[in-house]
Image (cartoon, grey):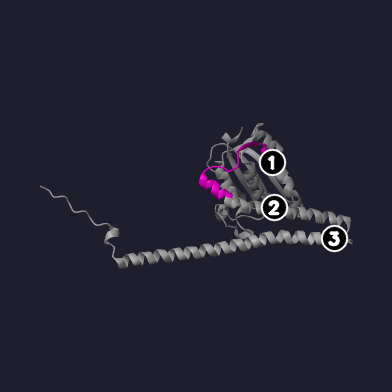
Amino acid sequence: MTLPSKPEPSAQASASPADETTRLRTENSALRTELGEARKSNQQYLQNVAHQLTAPLGAIKWSIEALKDPSVSIQRKSKLLSSIYSQATILVHLIKNFALMSNLEADLELGQFREPLEPVDILRLCINLANDFQPQAADSEKKIIVDEQSFAIALEGKNVQIVKNLIAQAVSNLLENAVKYSDSRSTILIAAERAGIENLPISLVVSVTSTGLPIRPEENKQLFERGFRGSNAKQKVPAGTGIGLYLAKRVMSLHQGAIGLKTTGKTSKFTLIFPLSRLV
């Protein structure tokens, strides 16, 4: 008759009190280090936020002071008003991004939108956003052009089923970067097409293309990570939050889409990729 074998003691049961204490101390040390890094990251983020908000507010205040001066010419006042509009656009854009951060995380955890999907004329949306950013672009003699014909061909008269405010913010983030980092007197192009990109099936692709600050190939994927900014971008504009492209990626994930980037020398083409099932 074979007797049943005696069960092996578990690793946890066989661990001595000294070993358990060592393990807990190691875990505690790792958690303290992680907490310290998180605090440092949050502090840096808040400092960047403060700087990002202070800059446009300071510019608006200075422009208003100049407008109050009776010796300033009408032509100069017109330019100052345009500058105020540009800085206000930047400010609104920043505040929307900060508000979007917490809302998006909640939406992703729930796996659903807090705002309803609706059929949107994405051409009209892009035209309106281009008009919003044009005064800011004009400060350095840049033009924002929407290729309406490309939208007509890609959309075939259909709308796109999306959360309008979220997609508007994603497009705005791409435009804001294009205006900020493109060359003076250059053109920023918004276009649409049906194409297979990033190993995805044929999709609706909305793109923002600009020429200016080159992006290093090894940084392409990292650009969509929270808090990451390209080395060339940090040299040109030291302050920044590094959340614009991250938020755009999260927005597209919620829409079962994707975001892409193709660079050729100084030309960068950012793409928002929608499944064709979004066309209605």
* Image position, residue 254 (x, y; %): 55, 43
Q: Nearer the viewer, residue 226 or 17?
A: 17
Mark 1 is on which residue type?
A: Leu
Q: Nearer the viewer, residue 9 or 140?
A: 9
Q: Is residue 156 above or below residue 240?
A: above
Report the side of 76 relative to 182 (left or right): right
Q: Are marks 3 and 2 in contact (CB under 8 Å)?
A: no
Mark 2 is on which residue type?
A: Val
User: Is residue 105 magenta-colored?
Assistant: yes
What's the distance in space between the residues labelled 1 and 2, CA to CA? Answer: 17 Å
Residue 184 makes an appearance in the image: no
Q: Please provide the residue range marked out in magenta.
A: 103-125
Q: Which residue is under mark 3?
A: 68
Q: Which residue is under mark 1?
A: 125
Q: Which residue is under mark 2?
A: 92
Q: Is residue 193 above or below residue 88?
A: above
Q: Nearer the viewer, mark 1 or mark 2?
A: 2
What's the distance in space between the residues labelled 1 and 3, CA to CA? Answer: 36 Å
